[in-house]
Amino acid sequence: MNVHDPAAELRANVAVPFERAQAMPVSVYTSESFQALEQEHVFATSWLCAGRVDALKEPGDYLTMEISGEPILVLRDREGVLRAMSNVCRHRMSTLLEGRGRVRVITCPYHAWTYALDGSLRGAPAMDMNQSFCKEANSLPAIRCVDWNGWIMVTLNPDLPEPQEQLAEVDDLVGYLGMADYVETFREEHRWNTNWKILAENFMESYHLPMCHGGTIGGAVNLRQMTCPEGKAHFNYHHILKDDSIALSIAHKDNTTLQGEDRLRTWLMAIYPSLLITLTPGYFWYLCLTPDGPGHVKILYGGGLHPDFAADPDAETHFSALKGLLDHVNDEDRGCTERVWRGMQGRLARPGALSHLERPNYEFARWIANRIPDV
Ligand code: FES
Ligand SMILES: [Fe+2]
């Protein structure tokens, strides 16, 4: 095996059964060339999440993102339909919108070509003398975009089955919680000094909870109460029974539809490649990851409450308690994942054996390995 070929190292890594599994090789995290392969074969070909549909409530509300270097805008059009399209002007290719906001039309900041919210070109100053110019032929290219359980999912891949189909097993597992109805109360963007997979893997195992989160939620979990099943084709998951030390993580006291352990069960789902969802009977939070070179990751971080908590008279108190808790949890995760990135830079860094509580990490490694072509 060529030790400079991260894809080959990864294939060898995932060729062993789970009972002998090791963490992924260092090169898979640190190599620029491997990240280029991920951009092409993972991010450009998968469904990716742009956030919650709550974020785009009114006509003209938009957000921008990049998929594998492709500038994209997602908006709600005049008819209330969610659309994604290229965020690149059809004139001399400036990007159009930045960040988030609300617009009536999309106006290019360079020469003021303007586009309607359906992407069609509406106006282009002083273009009447060029005989080749045709307004109708200059719409912004559409990109696939759907609402899946309240999540905005987009893809550059024209051939992928719909998320409803790919992720039908998510509904089988957590459909009873009604994920589409959870109310998003915050969303933020961050950039951490770690590889995107280190953060994804951190999210998909709860082995680190008692130690890394000793200052927050660590005490509410018990390693013996974690269940880590085999992964599914397009996601992995595990679940934990929490005690009642954090009231928001269990069913609302007035809730009568959730019964027994369902009142206490927290689900952690990693929708490949980069949508990470924690879903509890009281709240949810999520990360959407975008790699930014091997050593950085851009993060869309958001969360909110189950409708029972969002509707009760103490909703404001719940919102702020939740935000305070999650920010603290996230700070702890930042410390842990940035330390892993730093540790990996050492010459003596070697991946070690995985716990049975890291089954999702093994599944994730296999999923990535299957996407990277054998050259
Ligand atoms: S680049 Fe957009 S109007 Fe010229
Ligand atoms: Fe964590």
Image (cartoon, grey):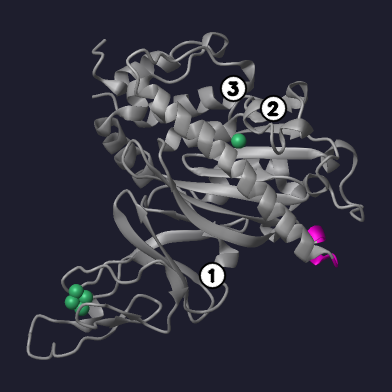
From the viewer's perspective, tell me whether residue 143 is left or right of residue 304.
left
For disc 1, the marked residue is 56
Local SS, label 3: helix
Q: Residues within 10 Å of mark 2 (few under 14, many from 20)?
A: some
Q: Disc 1 or 3, which lies upstream in sequence?
A: 1
Nearer the observer, 174 or 293: 293
Q: What amino acid is labelled 1 in the image?
A: Leu
Q: Nearer the viewer, mark 2 or mark 3?
A: 2
Q: Which residues are magenta?
A: 308-313
Q: Which residue is mark 2?
A: 210
The foreground one among 27 and 78 is 27
Q: On the image, numbered disc 3 is attached to which residue?
A: 359
First in sequence: mark 2 or mark 3? 2
In this orientation, does residue 234 appear? no
Badge 2 marks a residue whose secondary structure is: helix
Q: Residue at x 42, y 59 (%)?
A: 144
Q: Answer with mark 2 or mark 1, whichever residue precedes in sequence.
A: 1
Q: Is residue 259 left or right of residue 289?
A: right
